């Protein structure tokens, strides 16, 4: 498709006006007749067994309507976080909920409940749990496990593994849970000119969604209505129904707006069913407001790492070998596989000749963790990029050139899959992204300022890059062209705030060459006859949803031409479309409105009474509900899958580092995305900048801290956690995109969001390192006290492998 | 409805008619329709019903978005809760409920305040402007809202009402701020999506187009 009508053009998304006028409704903005409130009683201990709950007096208090405990909610699979816990495994884990006429009455009742706790051992250090006889986070005998492919299990290393290394300074590296390798790692290391082996730590940081995950639920006509804060719509419905013990069609999910998720609201999560169960029990609509402090308990955080990285480069800067070991601090319950993504990203982004990856996700008594923007890939960027600079410095190479020397290209291979075969990427234009950024940033000129001193301030120049897989296939598209001449684009994707629900819907408008004003997007409520779509996470929407909307539009296009040929004569191929008309060269034409009427008259496949067999039951049901209302375009995305679509990003940063205070100021930032064809330029620019902002937080501001003695969280407020504010940024930020199509997508699109964060985080770390004459901390975040200590020649208060520390 | 005097507001008495009659009127007139659904749950949903620590609710007058609203308010009730749960103005968001994030920002007598940290009783004689009061009578967007749309300032949108109100307050006092002045003025409003640059673009555009309106 050339000469696009919509693709690559800016537009005003339909939901942006609602956002600036306050009419956009988030979960806590809904009211239902008779609505009451519930509050949570959360664990004061990092690990305990609830032996007895005495709520007799509380339940008699004025305004109190009922209580929900773990016994009221069916338990999920082993290792997964429960909605309400009998054995809380972190401070803040919900134990019970009380509903009352007012929140205050619920709180008063909670204060009157007496719980008999049996305190249990706890740990905030995975290495402690791996030590033979060391404390475990869970009482069920499991100390390792992850979301997919690694069920809960137990691994203890040998005392000899620990004895071999300096405590706290080197990673013991006993038996891993998983590993892979390719090439001859030892032989390649022998060929290297420089080899670095470093222990490293990346801290956990909270997602800080601005909207705490409040939820409201009620039951009506045998259905459970749930207003929730979710990044995803259709994808979240089946797991939500399962948690409620219902069929998907028995749940109405309203998630039209989501006040930020960043991975933490990707699918249904345990606490969101509490108001639904409570509502069932007391027979009234229940609102559960989640406080900011509770959001730190229920809102997830990034997995933290303790690791060891060994990398070797030849004299030309080529990465020959890599050997990494990642111990993941997974929090209390089953979490995401960041530790795998760390290795996968290294294999793809730096293309070593040989590599070994070993990983181990260990439970600790921290709140449940899940994917956070670039889970694993962005930690890799933060650790690896400064080491690339170290090699460049030692080998006297340009820092952009050394990256480009190792960058993947179209068709490059990544890490080995379960079958041992290495995945390939259809497109990789990271080199182009670096070139574009280099030009826009004026790299050569800026490098002249590297290390320049101005009083106590030193200029640092940094470049960083990152990657994330960026697409899926196999989901459904559903469109309905109605007799009013409008194209109704049904999309089951969520509303993460990227406007991609609209950006990707425009592909249907593009194929059908219909004006955007004549398109209506149906989304955000499971009653709106939505197709089966994947969730809005993993930088996949632009890729996955352009495919589904493309195939549905192609289906509609074929039908439009068939209807025209039937009515106006000739063959379907004689016809084309544009301007809401299907027309032949002969001049005969039919409006879309008339075609929709004809489709209804013709019935069968045209108006949805006959449907493809391979679409998902959810799409089947939605299309059936629409049958007879217009011309239906519906199809499963069976387009070819030629490899793992992959998004890349590069970022360039100049800073001034104050060597006396350890503070830095970002002077300039340029970030460039390799996201395939640009669909929505303004939406892309704001994604690029937003990702960069989060990276700044990850690199230098944010981390979770736990008191090792009592297991208490030390920072459960925004001022203590320090997500970046206006004042942490340069006055203006600059963006660009490679804008080269990915060959595996019908419009050349691929994902965007996640690598932008890793690119800026690593660029900032590299800039700090540059200002420090090449010193590398092998840790995130890099905090001012670390910098001051370094310049003062003082030892750092943390050992290299200390985790969850101040 | 006659304009209540400061004395009426201070005594918590509605001018001219009883509290019971007032409630009947506002419900009948639809003036409180968005809050009416909430009445089923008890007016005290955000507080304790007339008991010791919370004290008792008093009927007061509030000037919100140019309208005088009569509402029962607890002594410890925050403006954010009054707006959201009693006046049906849910555009004002609660992000932290402790003055850290700015999502609940409203403009009181032309100054930006965190409504989560402002007691409703303290604004009885003042003019409160919320996100719902920005657009004109026929829905025409305020210059700040228009600029935020044109610059695609929001991402998830949750912090947007607060960002709007901070921008409105800024432009009231400094109609032509520099970008750095705007940055400082807006710095009480956190945005986890990181859309700061686009919000600043919006503020600068609104200023250029006479956003103090």
Image (cartoon, coloured by chain):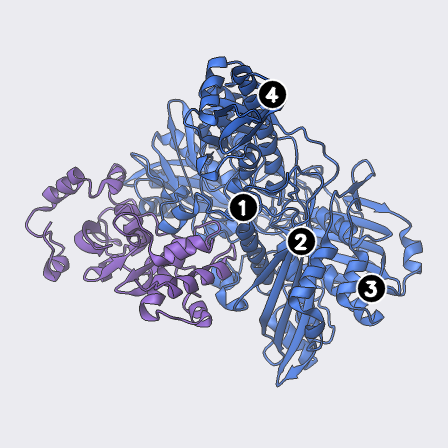
Chain colours: A blue, B purple
Q: Is residue A77 visible?
A: no
Residue A789 lies, in percent from the top left, at 66, 77
Residue A448 lies, in percent from the top left, at 71, 77
Q: Which residue is mark 1?
A: A118
Q: Residue at x 72, y 54 (%)?
A: A430
Residue density around tag 4, few if under 14, some if 14–19, many if 20 or more, within 10 Å? some
Q: CA distance from mark 3 to mark 2?
A: 32 Å
Q: CA distance from mark 4 to mark 3?
A: 65 Å
Q: Do tag 1 and tag 3 residues touch (Cβ < 8 Å)?
A: no
Q: CA distance from mark 1 to mark 3?
A: 47 Å
**Disc number lying in front (4 or 3):** 4
Same-chain status of marks 1 and 3? yes
In terms of secondary structure, where does tag 1 sit?
strand
Q: Does label 4 or label 2 sit earlier along the sequence?
A: 4
**Disc number lying in front (3 or 2):** 2
Q: CA distance from mark 1 to mark 2?
A: 58 Å
In terms of secondary structure, where does tag 2 sit?
loop
Is residue A186 or residue A110 the one in the foreground? A186
Q: CA distance from mark 4 to mark 2?
A: 38 Å
Q: Which residue is mark 4?
A: A572
Q: Which residue is mark 3?
A: A196
Q: Which residue is mark 2?
A: A738
Q: Does A78 sit above or below residue B63?
A: above
Q: Do tag 3 and tag 2 residues touch (Cβ < 8 Å)?
A: no
In terms of secondary structure, where does tag 4 sit?
helix
**In which quadrant of the rendered view does residue A49 lie?**
top right
């Amino acid at each position: 498709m050339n000469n696009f009508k919509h693709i690559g053009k800016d537009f005003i998304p339909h939901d942006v006006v609602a956002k600036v006028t306050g009419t956009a409704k988030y979960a806590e903005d809904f009211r239902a007749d008779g609505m009451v409130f519930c509050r949570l009683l959360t664990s004061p201990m990092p690990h305990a067994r609830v032996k007895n709950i005495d709520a007799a007096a509380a339940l008699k208090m004025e305004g109190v309507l009922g209580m929900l405990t773990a016994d009221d909610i069916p338990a999920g699979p082993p290792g997964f976080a429960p909605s309400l816990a009998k054995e809380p495994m972190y401070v803040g884990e919900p134990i019970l909920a009380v509903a009352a006429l007012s929140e205050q009455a619920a709180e008063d009742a909670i204060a009157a409940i007496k719980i008999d706790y049996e305190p249990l051992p706890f740990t905030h250090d995975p290495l402690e749990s791996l030590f033979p006889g060391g404390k475990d986070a869970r009482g069920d005998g499991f100390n390792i496990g992850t979301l997919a492919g690694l069920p809960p299990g137990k691994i203890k290393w040998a005392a000899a593994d620990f004895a071999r290394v300096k405590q706290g300074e080197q990673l013991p590296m006993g038996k891993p849970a998983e590993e892979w390798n390719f090439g001859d790692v030892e032989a390649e290391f022998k060929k290297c000119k420089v080899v670095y082996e470093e222990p490293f730590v990346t801290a956990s940081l909270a997602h800080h969604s601005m909207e705490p995950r409040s939820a409201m639920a009620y039951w009506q006509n045998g259905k459970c209505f749930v207003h929730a804060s979710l990044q995803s719509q259709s994808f979240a419905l089946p797991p939500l129904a399962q948690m409620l013990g219902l069929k998907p069609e028995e749940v109405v999910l309203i998630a039209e707006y989501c006040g930020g998720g960043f991975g933490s609201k990707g699918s249904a999560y345990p606490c969101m069913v509490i108001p639904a169960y409570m509502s069932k029990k007391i027979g009234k609509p229940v609102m559960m407001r989640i406080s900011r402090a509770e959001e730190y308990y229920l809102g997830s955080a990034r997995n933290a790492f303790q690791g060891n990285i060994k990398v070797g480069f030849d004299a030309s800067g080529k990465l020959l070998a890599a050997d990494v070991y990642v111990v993941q601090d997974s929090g209390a319950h089953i979490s995401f596989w960041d530790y795998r993504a760390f290795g996968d990203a290294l294999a793809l982004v730096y293309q070593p000749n040989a590599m070994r990856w070993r990983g181990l996700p260990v439970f600790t008594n921290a709140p449940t963790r899940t994917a956070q923007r670039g889970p694993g890939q962005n930690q890799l960027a933060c650790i690896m990029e400064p080491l690339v600079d170290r090699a460049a410095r030692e080998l006297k190479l340009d820092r952009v050139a050394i990256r480009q020397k190792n960058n993947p290209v179209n068709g490059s291979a990544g890490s080995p899959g379960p079958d041992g075969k290495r995945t390939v990427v259809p497109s990789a234009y990271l080199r182009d992204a670096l070139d574009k950024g280099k030009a826009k940033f004026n790299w050569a000129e800026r490098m002249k300022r590297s290390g320049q001193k101005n009083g106590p301030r030193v200029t640092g120049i940094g470049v960083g890059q990152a990657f994330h897989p960026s697409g899926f296939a196999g989901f459904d598209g559903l469109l309905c062209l109605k007799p009013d001449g409008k194209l109704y684009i049904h999309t089951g994707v969520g509303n993460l705030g990227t406007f991609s629900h609209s950006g990707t819907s425009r592909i249907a408008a593009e194929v059908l060459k219909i004006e955007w004003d004549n398109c209506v997007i149906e989304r955000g409520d499971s009653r709106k006859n939505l197709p089966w779509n994947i969730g809005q996470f993993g930088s996949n929407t632009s890729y996955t949803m352009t495919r589904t909307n493309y195939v549905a539009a192609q289906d509609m296009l074929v039908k439009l031409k068939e209807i025209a040929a039937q009515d106006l004569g000739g063959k379907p191929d004689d016809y084309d479309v544009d301007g809401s008309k299907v027309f032949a060269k002969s001049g005969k034409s039919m409006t879309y409105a008339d075609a929709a009427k004809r489709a209804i008259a013709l019935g069968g496949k045209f108006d949805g009474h006959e449907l493809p067999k391979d679409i998902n039951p959810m799409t089947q049901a939605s299309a059936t509900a629409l049958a007879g209302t217009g011309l239906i375009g519906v199809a499963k995305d069976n387009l070819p899958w030629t490899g793992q679509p992959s998004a890349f990003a590069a970022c360039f940063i100049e800073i001034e580092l104050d060597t006396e205070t350890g503070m830095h100021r970002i002077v300039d930032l340029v970030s460039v995305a390799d996201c395939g064809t640009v669909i929505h330029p303004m939406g892309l620019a704001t994604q690029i900048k937003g990702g960069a902002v989060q990276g700044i937080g990850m690199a230098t501001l944010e981390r979770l801290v736990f008191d090792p003695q009592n297991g208490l969280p030390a920072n459960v407020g925004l001022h203590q956690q320090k997500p970046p504010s206006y004042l942490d940024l340069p006055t203006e930020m600059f963006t660009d995109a490679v804008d080269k199509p990915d060959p595996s997508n019908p419009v050349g699109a691929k994902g965007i969001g996640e690598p932008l964060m890793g690119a800026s985080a690593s660029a900032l770390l590299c800039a700090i390192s540059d200002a420090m004459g090449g010193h590398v901390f092998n840790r995130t975040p890099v905090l001012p006290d670390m910098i001051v200590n370094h310049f003062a020649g003082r030892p750092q208060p943390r050992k290299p492998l200390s985790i969850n520390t101040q | 409805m006659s304009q209540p005097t400061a004395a009426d507001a201070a005594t918590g008495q509605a001018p001219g008619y009883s509290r019971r009659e007032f409630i009947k009127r506002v419900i009948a007139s639809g003036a409180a329709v968005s809050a009416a659904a909430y009445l089923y749950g008890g007016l005290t949903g955000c507080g304790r019903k007339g008991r010791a620590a919370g004290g008792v609710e008093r009927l007061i007058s509030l000037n919100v978005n140019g309208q005088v609203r009569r509402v029962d308010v607890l002594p410890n009730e925050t403006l954010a809760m009054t707006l959201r749960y009693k006046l049906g103005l849910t555009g004002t968001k609660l992000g932290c409920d402790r003055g850290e994030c700015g999502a609940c920002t409203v403009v009181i007598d032309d100054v930006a305040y965190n409504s989560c940290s402002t007691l409703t009783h303290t604004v009885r004689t003042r003019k409160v402007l919320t996100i719902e009061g920005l657009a004109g009578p026929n829905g025409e967007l305020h210059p700040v809202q228009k600029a935020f749309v044109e610059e695609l300032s929001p991402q998830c949108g949750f912090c947007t009402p607060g960002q709007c109100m901070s921008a409105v307050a800024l432009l009231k006092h400094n109609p032509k701020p520099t970008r750095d002045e705007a940055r400082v003025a807006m710095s009480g409003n956190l945005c986890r999506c990181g859309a700061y640059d686009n919000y600043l673009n919006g503020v600068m555009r609104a200023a250029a187009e006479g956003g103090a309106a």
